[in-house]
Image: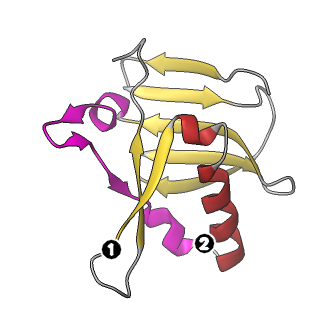
Amino acid sequence: MNEPTINYDEVSDTLYISFALGEKGTGIELNEHLLLRVNKQEKRAIGLTIFEYSVLAQRTDLGLRNVPLTGLENLSEETRQMVLAVLQREPVNRFLRLSAYTPSVTELIPITSVEPLPVLA
């Protein structure tokens, strides 16, 4: 696997990560801050865009910020399962940490935190 190409635009506070430079894919909005690009046929990540990166990657007194993956609600069950699998594998799991919030025994809300990059922290 090739090393991802990482570009940070300080003006817009946007981090662009490409796992397959120049390859076209389907964009899936995970929430208002996270856009995952995937090759749906091969079920693999092509890229990840993180808007407001410095805010999301900033540590708080309680640890990393967690954000809900609200965009998963709008996907078909098949696509949702594919996206969750992609999020848990290399290379995406180097940048996003997937976990869950359980407000009750029957509810499970996927959430994620952004791993701060040492060169940008």
Residue at mark 1? 102
For label 1, count other residues whose C-alpha is less than 10 Å away and answer few (under 14), some (14-19) or many (20+). Answer: few
Q: Residue furthest front?
A: 105
In the image, residue 103 lies at what x, y percent? 27, 77
In the image, residue 70 lies at what x, y percent? 42, 65
Side of 116 relative to 20 (left or right): left
Looking at the image, which residue is at 65% across and 77% down?
76
Tell me the kind of residue under disc 2.
Leu
The residue range painted magenta reads 53-74
Q: Residue furthest left?
A: 61
Side of 27 relative to 117 (left or right): right
Tell me the kind of residue under disc 1.
Thr
Q: What secondary structure is marked by label 2?
A: loop
Where residue 113 sits, quadrant-wise, is: top left
Which quadrant holds the C terminus?
A: top left
Q: Nearer the viewer, mark 1 or mark 2?
A: 1
For label 2, count other residues whose C-alpha is less than 10 Å away and answer few (under 14), some (14-19) or many (20+). Answer: some
Question: Is the residue under label 2 in contact with that under label 1 (CB below 8 Å)?
Answer: no
Which quadrant holds the N terminus?
A: top right
Does residue 117 lie above or below 42 as drawn?
Answer: above
Side of 76 relative to 42 (left or right): left
User: Does the segment drawn in magenta span residue 73?
Assistant: yes
Where residue 77 sits, quadrant-wise, is: bottom right
